[in-house]
Image (spheres, grey):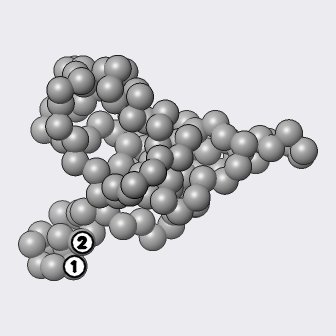
Amino acid sequence: MPRCVSDATYEIANISLSRHAEESAVLVALASGAMALPEGRKTPRCIEAVYTTATPCGSCRQFLLEFATEDCMIYIDDQMEGPEIYRFQDLLPRPFTAEKQLAVSGHVSAGDA
């Protein structure tokens, strides 16, 4: 499987003017080549787990969606109570994805999205 390189081009749906910790961690992994780029994809889907001290904000959830595997888990440990564990899909049940938007616009069939 090819590895990402620093001069690679990535398509990311959610770009803002500042970065949060979750986004920064993913961008560092991309820049260092730590994320494998599957054949035919412009964005790797390789985040299997996220460890954090607070629930990721909406912007971070959308950003993580670009890279999360279908069975990605979120571990939240705020040190006050025991760690909480969520499926990423449960934190973002109706995500904004390019595939869904193409289906809505009629560019692909709903079965393809």
Q: Within the image, what quadrant is residue 36 found in?
A: top left
Gap between marks 1 and 2 measured at Cα: 5 Å
Q: How crowded is mark 2: few (under 14 residues within 10 Å), some or many (20 or more)?
A: some
Residue projecting furthest to the right: 80
Residue 71: in sight, yes or no? no
Q: In this view, does 103 lie to the left or right of 51?
A: left
Residue 76: in sight, yes or no? yes
Q: Name the residue under label 2.
A: 101
Q: Nearer the viewer, residue 28 or 34?
A: 28
Q: Is residue 111 above or below residue 105?
A: above
Q: Mark 1 near mark 2, Cβ–Cβ under 8 Å? A: yes
Q: Which amino acid does label 1 sit on?
A: Val
The image quadrant where one finds the C terminus is: bottom left
Q: In this view, does 96 lie above or below 83?
A: below
- List x then y, in percent, for residue 58: 53, 62
Q: In this view, does 92 lie above or below 65?
A: below
The image quadrant where one finds the N terminus is: top left
- List x then y, in percent, for residue 70: 43, 47
